[in-house]
Amino acid sequence: MPIEKIVKQLGDYLDKGERKNKAHCERIDGLLGKLKEKEAKLQKKLSEEDDPDKKKRLKIDLKIVEAQRKKGKKRRKELDVKCK
């Protein structure tokens, strides 16, 4: 196999990896946006709710969403170098 063909295949392989990382970053960005919207909705519901049991459940759900966002932001920051 000629060296030019090997170099071309290697370049194609590396480009695929780079595109995959960018797609991964875009997916994380989309999920973070959805989680932010969900968090806002839960906060609104929580402020409007009077029933103590439902309020407790909403607080738990809100904490879960906040933890997911925090974890997503951390992962996005780790991938920041690859996403540019």
Image (cartoon, rainbow, N blue to C red):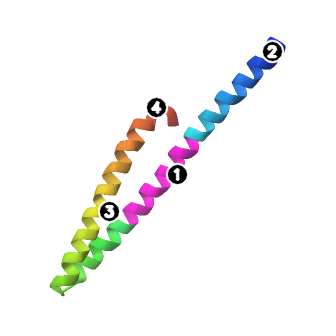
Magenta-span inclusion, residue 6: no
Quadrant in which the N terminus is drawn:
top right
Apparent side of residue 28 relative to residue 2 in the rendered image (left or right):
left
Which residue appears at 34% of the width and 56% of the height? 68
Specify the amino acid type for callout 1.
Answer: Arg
Q: Which residues are magenta?
A: 22-37
- As drawn, the label of residue 3 is none
Separation of residues labelled 4 and 1 (CA atoms): 16 Å
Measure how far apart labels 2 and 3 are at the Cα level.
50 Å
Residue that numbered label 1 is attached to: 27
Cβ atoms under marks 1 and 2 closer than 8 Å: no
Counting from the top left corner in percent of width and height, residue 69 is at: 34, 55
Amino acid type at image mark 2: Glu
- Estimate how packed mark 3 is, as few (under 14), some (14 to 19) or many (20 or more) residues with alpha carbons within 10 Å: some
- What residue is disc 4 on? 81
Q: Is residue 41 left or right of residue 46?
A: right
Residue drawn at x 23%, y 82% as measured from the top left: 54
* Residue 17, quarter of the rendered image: top right
Q: Picture coordinates of residue 59 (x, y %)? A: 22, 71
